[in-house]
Image (cartoon, rainbow, N blue to C red):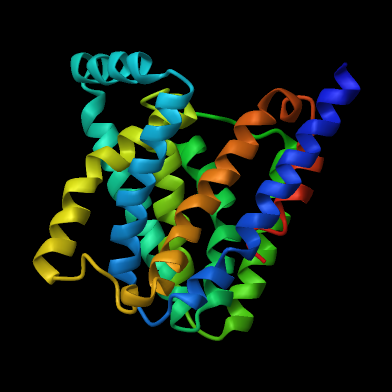
């Protein structure tokens, strides 16, 4: 059973990160649309999709209970901050891909684990043993060399790395499940996204008359949710995967 769960975890994790690595291809299909429009539609339709997921898995009551708990313990502010940070990360990533900065965007997600380690050391008082310190130092050296070869300060990469790192750090304060957490995050930021589309008059994307733009917008909404579903389904198996295997499987994602 343990071997079966491990194989399942490897399969779901590999499929998940491979899908995420191929995701920029879909952003390129949407490059005729403003990045803010893509982001706003992604937020709104992600919320709709996650509501359907919660309804299907009968987690509505649990989600409402978690929201009330956040109100009592002051976690609402952390959740809203997490929503802002992940929205910023999405926007920068979409903009970077559609404006020819794919390599710098990829570098940002290689820098991100180092940012997470740094935040853990500074704020969570985590300590590295010698082997971990060596591993982090090698990774940092590789990132510095890549940044040096890039020829200029990789502002986009740094913004992506720190926004996602701070997002993960903020999420630790809420301790929500993946499905409920994503639903509440999109719920918090959805009014802003909807207000932007209404005020800008971009509620209907260009080319929607033919249905093409709606199809292209529908794909980015569903694919990340499929990725999340893969990770959720493979959670028990992923616990059996050694971290070295997990990180190897993660490599297609930034590429």
Q: Residue at x 28, y 68 (%)?
A: 36
Q: Position of residue 233 (x, y in %)?
A: 65, 30
Foreground residue among 252 and 212: 212
Foreground residue among 219 and 147: 219
Residue at the farthest front position: 210
State the image quarter where residue 107 is shown. bottom right
Q: Position of residue 215 (x, y in %)?
A: 45, 65
In the image, taking residue 83 as reference, residue 219 lies left or right, namely right
Reply above or below: 104 against 173. below
Would residue 44 be seen by someone viewing this image from the given angle?
yes
State the image quarter where residue 209 is shown. bottom left
Q: Residue at x 83, y 28 (%)?
A: 6
Quadrant (top left/top right/bottom left/bottom right) for the C terminus: bottom right
Foreground residue among 159 and 241: 241
Question: So how many labels did they put on this image?
Answer: 0
Q: Position of residue 152 (x, y in %)?
A: 49, 83
Reply above or below: 143 against 210. above
In the image, taking residue 252 as reference, residue 63 lies left or right, namely left
Q: Position of residue 68 (x, y in %)?
A: 23, 16
In the image, taking residue 188 as reference, residue 101 lies left or right, namely right
State the image quarter where residue 3 is shown. top right
Would residue 93 be seen by someone viewing this image from the given angle?
no
Q: Residue at x 39, y 66 (%)?
A: 214
Reply above or below: 224 against 244. below
């Amino acid at each position: 059973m343990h071997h079966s769960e491990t194989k399942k975890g490897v399969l779901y994790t590999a499929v998940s990160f491979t899908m995420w690595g191929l995701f920029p291809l879909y952003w390129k299909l949407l490059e005729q649309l403003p990045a803010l429009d893509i982001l706003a539609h992604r937020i709104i339709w992600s919320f709709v999709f996650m509501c359907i997921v919660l309804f299907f898995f009968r987690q509505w009551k649990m989600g409402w209970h978690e929201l009330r708990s956040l109100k009592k313990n002051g976690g609402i502010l952390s959740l809203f901050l997490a929503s802002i940070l992940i929205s910023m990360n999405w926007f920068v990533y979409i903009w970077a891909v559609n404006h020819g900065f794919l390599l710098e965007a990829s570098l940002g997600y290689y820098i991100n684990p180092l940012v997470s380690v740094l935040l853990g050391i500074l704020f969570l008082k985590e300590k590295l043993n010698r082997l971990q310190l060596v591993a982090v130092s090698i990774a940092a050296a590789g990132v510095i060399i890549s940044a040096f070869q890039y020829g200029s300060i990789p502002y986009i990469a740094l913004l992506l790395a720190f926004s996602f790192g701070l997002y993960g750090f903020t999420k630790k304060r809420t301790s929500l499940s993946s499905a409920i957490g994503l639903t509440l995050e999109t719920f918090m930021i959805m009014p802003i996204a909807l207000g932007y589309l209404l005020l800008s008059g971009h509620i209907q994307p260009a080319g929607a008359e033919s249905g093409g733009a709606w199809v292209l917008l529908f794909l980015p909404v569903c694919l990340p949710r499929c990725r999340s579903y893969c990770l959720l389904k493979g959670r028990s198996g992923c616990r059996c995967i050694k971290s070295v295997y997990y990180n190897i499987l993660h490599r297609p994602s930034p590429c």
